[in-house]
Image (spheres, rainbow, N blue to C red):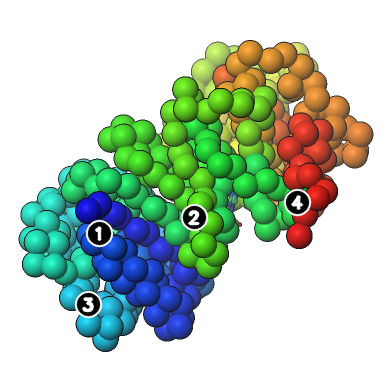
Amino acid sequence: MALIVQKYGGTSVADVDRIKIVANKVKNEIEKGNQVVVILSAMSGVTNSLVKFCNDITTFYDNREYDAVVATGEQVTIGLLAIALQNMGIKARSYAGWQVPIITDNAFGKARIKEIKPDNLLKSLENGEVPIIAGFQGIEIESGRVATLGRGGSDTSAVAVAAAINADCCDIFTDVEGVYTTDPRIVKVAKKLEKITFEEILEMASLGAKVLQTRSVELAMKYKVKLRVLSSFVDAPGTLICSEDEIVEKEVISGITYNKDEAKFTLVNIDDVPGVSANIFKVMSNAGINVDMIVQSVSSGTKTNMTFTVPDSEFEKAKKAIEANKDLLNYESFLFDRKVVKVSIVGIGMKSHSGVAETMFRALAEKNINIMAISTSEIKISVLIADEYTELALRVLHTAFGLDKEISEKE
Ligand code: ADP
Ligand code: ASP
Ligand code: MG
């Protein structure tokens, strides 16, 4: 008998028919003698429209009220799955985050899980019930308020629950068959990976591959959760996330990602003196915004230009912070561009191979794609380009690094 955590994403619970399919999948495991704990997302599109409702009133909302709104999507699906399972004669009950409880910090809107008390879940399992938990949400104990975990947070709920109850595995069911070399919805010749290392999927997730939330990978790594990504639509083995020594054939590049949630600012004619970058970071972090890429142009005399990127979802906040700190930053004017995308190549093989950056930049240059900013780490290279070239850039890089699926495998 195994203790299995299953997480189903938005498309997997998109309507009542899909929820019945999920109920059948759970039933199959129960009939095999396994115990199952389920984590659910909201129906696909629901969280987006809840977020939009908030933004349609103001982009400067109280995050606690934003959480009160956006946490509602998951309550619908957990109740419906419990009803579907009960209707099949299987004992089941739904749990909102606070009923587990899943305890978070007070960073409303992008909270982190501090602790999960497993007793209620374990009791449920002992009673032969299937606990069905609302993903994406928890409770901040001091205020007693619901807190959400950031977009895509149900993945993190699932891994955290799996760690808390010491589950044998955590299966993330989604709308594609696993982790691919790049987004299979954009590049048709993307290949499904049988295995990928924690380090690589962590980097890919943080660079925009939304198949897993970054924090879920961090937790799986820390608590050694056996994590798989697989489809709820097709019966196929999916992708196992594992450590480096479990992968025999190592490619130089494992994946290519893109992130459109980027906005670029350029501060024109600022003082070329020490401390300017520090001031930009200070202004942004005071506004709760993460600065990502940063580039300083060659100075002309005592003045220079500074370009940096922030999440586009924080654009209004960032703009307001820049305007409010004109004196401190001492710029002559500022420019912005919201139509940019960050494209990244990721691979542990980069550690031991040279020429990777050259291949990347040359492939882009051959298509006349201009690079506005570059950032690198040991296992990734990112470039900022105009977002109209997203698909083209992904395709040429995918081919340049030999990742395209064989012709015979194409559907
Ligand atoms: P869910 O609602 O199940 O959580 P998400 O939309 O959050 O699903 O994540 C799955 C999506 O991630 C896929 O539909 C795919 O378009 C996208 N994706 C981006 N990069 C990758 C990748 N490298 N491998 C697989 N899927 C990816
Ligand atoms: N429903 C939430 C979202 O769309 C959480 C999730 O699906 O993981 O971000
Ligand atoms: Mg997701």
Q: Is residue 141 above or below residue 245?
A: below
Closer to the N terminus: mark 1 or mark 3? 1
Q: Is residue 405 visible?
A: yes
Identify residue type, mark 3: Ile
Q: Nearer the viewer, residue 254 or 134?
A: 254
The mark found on residue 409 in the picture is 4
Identify residue type, mark 2: Leu
Measured in 3D between alpha carbons, the distance from the residue under mark 1 to the one under mark 3, in whole angstroms, is 13 Å
Q: Can you tell me whether the CB of the residue at mark 3 lies under 8 Å from the nearest atom of ligand 1?
A: no
User: What residue is shown with label 3?
Assistant: 90
Q: Secondary structure at mark 1?
A: loop
Q: Is residue 399 above or below residue 127?
A: above
Residue displayed at 24% across by 47% down = 167
Residue displayed at 63% across by 34% down = 254
User: What residue is shown with label 1?
Assistant: 34
Q: Quadrant of residue 365?
A: top right
Question: x, y percentage for residue 278?
Answer: 49, 23
Measured in 3D between alpha carbons, the distance from the residue under mark 4 to the one under mark 3, in whole angstroms, is 40 Å
Residue displayed at 35% across by 74% down = 23
Identify residue type, mark 1: Asn
Closer to the N terminus: mark 1 or mark 4? 1
Question: x, y percentage for residue 114?
Answer: 21, 43
Q: Quadrant of residue 347?
A: top right
Closer to the N terminus: mark 4 or mark 3? 3
